[in-house]
Amino acid sequence: MVVVVIIGIMTALIIPEMKGTFEDALLRSTGRDLVNAFSLASSRAISLNQPHRVELDTHTGKFLIESRARENAREEFAPLKDVAGSDGKLDSRISIEVRKPDEIDSENPEANRAPEEGLPDAILFNPDGTADAAEIWLRDRAGFRLVLRLNPITSRVQVIEPEHE
């Protein structure tokens, strides 16, 4: 009886600590997927000397890497073909918000406004190694958040973990 009571007490102490472990892993995995897509778009833009962009649909969680293509004397973007990691779908349990520079308040990040509804968000990566400035806010159902801040000068991603809601 004593052993069963001790196991019950230990279980009661351990289970609350493990809550959020799965959600945290899912959130970080989603962040890694986006960081990999940004890295691929940046490296292809530089190596091929051709602008690339990552298109994010915040409603469906789908992302797609596109390269600039000329068709009928117009410049348009076309999806990459036969390139691993050039498209994908993020877990539906993670919400995504893309904030552009005019929406970002670096002094008070909590006051930033949410993006407007509409077309998918696109982040452009240039052949000179620069990119559009943006912050991608990822949030799971448990209130854990992760911010991917894209440096416009180096096109590198800084991962920031804000306080839990």
Image: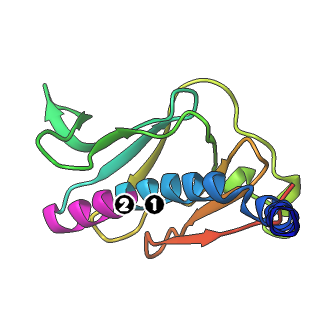
Residue depicted at x 76% and y 40%? 114
Residue 73: % across, % down: 15, 31
Residue 64 seen in render? no
Relative vertical location of residue 75 with respect to residue 162 in this rendering, above or below: above
Q: Is residue 42 magenta?
A: yes
| Residue most extreme to the front | 1
Who's the residue at 66% across and 26% down the image? Answer: 117
Q: Is mark 1 on a helix, strand or loop?
A: helix
- Please name whichever residue, 15 or 128, is drawn nearer the observer in this view of the structure: 15
- Mark 1 packing: few (<14 Cα in 10 Å), some, or many (20+)? some
Vertical placement of residue 139 versus 9, above or below: above
Nearest the viewer among 32 and 103 is 32
Q: State left or right for residue 155 relative to residue 161.
A: left
User: Would you say residue 114 is visible in this rendering?
Assistant: yes
- Dominant SS of magenta comes to helix
What percent of the width, then of the height, locates residue 6?
Answer: 85, 69
- Distance from the alpha carbon under mark 2 to that under mark 1: 6 Å
Q: SS class of the residue under badge 2?
A: helix
- Write down the residue under mark 2: 36
The type of residue carrying mark 2 is Asn
Range of residues picked out in magenta = 38-48
Residue 103 included in the magenta stretch of the image: no
The answer to which of 147 and 28 lies nearer the viewer is 28
> Where's residue 21, x and y in %?
66, 59
- Confirm or deny contact between disc 2 and disc 1 (CB under 8 A): yes
Which quadrant is home to the N terminus?
Answer: bottom right
Disc 2 crowd rating (10 Å Cα; few below 14, some 14-19, many 20+) is some
Q: What mark, if any, has residue 32 been given in the picture?
A: 1
